[in-house]
Image (cartoon, helix red, strand yellow):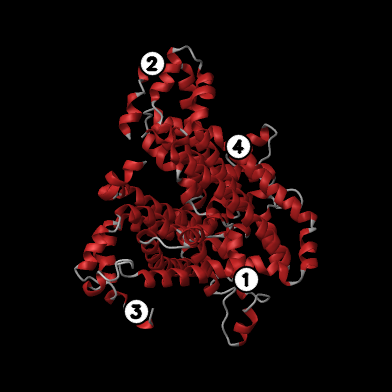
């Protein structure tokens, strides 16, 4: 990628138009992308590091952090397990209805977060189809942790399958068929043949799922009920603090959440090169038609 | 077809059967994977979306019509659609400049810029929301100088557009960047040698080649923008009929226990963004088939 880019720039003969564009690029990055994170940390540390730390170790804050981590782990485990199986199904087989399944898996990406929360209230809310019946037998889903988990599952649904599918398709199925002939079981093929070659793509999908699950606000906000200490995740706690004019506490929590999410997403760039190196197993033959 | 075959799919393609069953798939796991996928997809996506599609009709067509005949809803949808369109349009030149700077120059800090461009993807929306609201508030770092110029951003439609521009920017950059990278720089150099002025190069050489990528970036940013909630509500002002976005009205209707009203807005949002993303996917398939300069690599 650098070969192409490096062929053109000759800093010796930059035209005034180019210099203006470069200045514009720096201005856009500075004003739109650098200022916001700088502001988060400035506001968080406005009353000193002690105040910032005190506000994220407050009992309600700690319970929000704990709930966020629990929901994230649960959503990642569920969506990764099923996402891998869906990736296998859609990559290794051609069958009627496959296109419909691919399209359905993509849907949650286009859904507004608020809608992703609303749909669960239609099923389990007080006026929902089954909300009241379940309430009578003592099961509460809306405005409680099960609802938060369902909303998180919905918004993080496609990531693992989406990152795995192109790679698994490129792998083809020769190695898998060979393993079958050697008598390997389905799980052994998946664990021993397919996934090791796709492990960086899988990790990438898991990290995307994690980051999105931690940071989800709209969907969780609709189903949560906002009970501090009980059903407030980190993003919801940030909203409560901010609307309560507790700016330092809100931005301290925001800084912590932003660090967690960007570190998770940033980890992907560490092994992005390896993801690209995973692909060539079939790339030469598959790429011939393109 | 027997239940036991479902339970032990590994036995199916045993060497004994392999020849006689060549028509069937030798690879194990099809039923297991299909069953798991249908269960997962059915419970987490199809079931709730069915509720969304069916629920508005449950109280009869008249209730549905009453829910649709709501001035506040149309006002909110108009605010959402207009802001999303405007933000995506304003992002186009910004995204183009950033993509150009990434691909065609070797600026100091290029890698840093590359990482920063994905920031709006990575930062949770609630964090974006309170940050932009503070940044553009009348006392904020950007809000104060702007308000001295007579421009008030926060707590108005302008604030909504500013938030959506932040959220949408990476979509434009990341759509344009790979196409620009595949475009030989010699094209621009040839145009320069032939005496084209910089704006002519942009208008006649770059824009036609990048148009599909620009449209698809625009579509992605727009689809995201109409549904965006967390990064907008803190800066929006949220005045009904003026600066209230459609996703917020969904929440308001839910708090009023007006499920029919909430669901009809949700349904419109879902259809609009899915249609937009489907159009983008179609455009990309056409581009991949070589109808535009993307196949150069």
Report the Cα–Cα distance between label 3 and label 2. 71 Å
Mark 3 or 1: the one toward you: 3
Q: Is the residue at mark 4 from the same chain as the one at mark 2?
A: no
Q: Which residue is mark 1?
A: A121
Report the Cα–Cα distance between label 4 and label 3. 56 Å
Q: Residue visible at 52% across and 56% down?
A: A109
Can residue B133 be seen at all in this image of the molecule? yes
In the rendered image, residue A196, in percent from the top left (x then y), is placed at: 26, 60
In the rendered image, residue A127, in percent from the top left (x then y), is placed at: 68, 75
Mark 3 or 2: the one toward you: 3
Q: Which residue is mark 2?
A: A13
Tell me which chain the residue with mark 3 is part of: B
In the rendered image, residue A281, in percent from the top left (x then y), is placed at: 25, 50
Name the one closer to the observer, B150 or B163: B163
Tell me which chain the residue with mark 1 is part of: A
Q: Which residue is mark 3?
A: B5
Q: Is the residue at mark 4 from the same chain as the one at mark 3?
A: yes
């Amino acid at each position: 990628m650098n070969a192409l880019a490096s062929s053109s720039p000759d800093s010796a003969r930059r035209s005034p138009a180019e210099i203006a564009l470069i200045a514009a690029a720096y201005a856009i990055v500075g004003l739109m992308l650098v200022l916001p994170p700088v502001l988060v940390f400035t506001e968080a540390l406005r009353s000193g590091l002690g105040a910032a730390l005190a506000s994220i170790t407050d009992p309600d804050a700690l319970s929000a952090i704990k709930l966020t981590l629990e929901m994230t782990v649960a959503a990642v485990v569920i969506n990764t397990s099923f996402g891998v199986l869906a990736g296998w199904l859609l990559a290794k087989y051609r069958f009627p209805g496959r296109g419909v399944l691919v399209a359905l898996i993509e849907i949650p990406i286009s859904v507004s977060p608020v809608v992703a929360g609303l749909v669960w209230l239609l099923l389990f809310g007080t006026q929902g189809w089954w909300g009241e019946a379940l309430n009578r037998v003592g099961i509460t889903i809306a405005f409680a942790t099960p609802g938060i988990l369902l909303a998180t599952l919905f918004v993080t649904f496609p990531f693992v399958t989406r990152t795995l599918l192109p790679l698994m398709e490129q792998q083809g199925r020769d190695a898998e068929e060979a393993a079958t002939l050697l008598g390997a079981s389905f799980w052994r093929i998946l664990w021993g043949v397919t996934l090791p070659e796709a492990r960086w793509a899988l990790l990438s999908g898991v990290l995307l799922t994690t980051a999105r699950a931690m940071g989800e606000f709209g969907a969780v906000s609709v189903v949560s009920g906002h009970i501090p200490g009980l059903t407030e995740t980190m993003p919801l706690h940030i909203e409560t603090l901010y609307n309560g004019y507790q700016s330092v506490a809100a931005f301290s929590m925001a800084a912590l959440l932003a660090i967690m999410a960007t570190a998770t997403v940033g980890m992907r760039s560490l092994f992005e090169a390896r993801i690209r190196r995973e692909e060539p197993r079939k790339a030469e033959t598959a790429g011939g038609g393109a | 077809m027997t239940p036991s075959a479902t339970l032990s799919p590994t036995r199916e393609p045993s060497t004994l059967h392999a020849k006689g069953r060549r028509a069937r798939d030798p690879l194990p796991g099809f039923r297991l994977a299909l069953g798991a996928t249908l269960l997962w997809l059915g419970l987490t996506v199809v079931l709730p979306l069915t509720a969304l599609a069916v629920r508005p009709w449950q109280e009869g067509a008249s209730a549905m019509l009453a829910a649709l005949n709501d001035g506040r809803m149309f006002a909110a949808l108009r605010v959402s659609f207009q802001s999303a369109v405007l933000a995506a349009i304003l992002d186009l030149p910004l995204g183009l400049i950033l993509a150009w700077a990434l691909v065609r120059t070797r600026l100091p800090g290029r890698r840093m810029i590359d990482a920063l461009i994905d920031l709006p993807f990575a930062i949770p929306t609630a964090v974006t929301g309170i940050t932009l609201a503070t940044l553009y508030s009348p006392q904020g770092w950007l809000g104060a100088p702007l308000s001295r110029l007579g421009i008030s951003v926060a707590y108005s439609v302008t604030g909504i557009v500013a938030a959506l521009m932040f959220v949408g920017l990476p979509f434009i950059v990341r759509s344009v960047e790979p196409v620009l990278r595949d475009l030989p720089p010699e094209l621009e150099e040839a145009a320069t040698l032939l005496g084209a002025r910089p704006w002519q190069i942009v208008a006649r050489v770059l824009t036609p080649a990048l148009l599909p990528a620009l449209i698809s970036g625009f579509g992605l940013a727009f689809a995201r923008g109409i549904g965006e909630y967390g990064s907008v509500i803190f800066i929006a002002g949220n005045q009904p009929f003026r600066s209230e976005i459609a996703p917020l009205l969904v929440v308001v209707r839910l708090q009023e226990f007006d499920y029919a009203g909430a669901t009809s807005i949700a349904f419109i949002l879902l259809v609009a963004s899915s249609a937009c993303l489907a159009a983008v996917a179609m455009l990309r398939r056409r581009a991949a088939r070589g109808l535009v300069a993307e196949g150069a690599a």
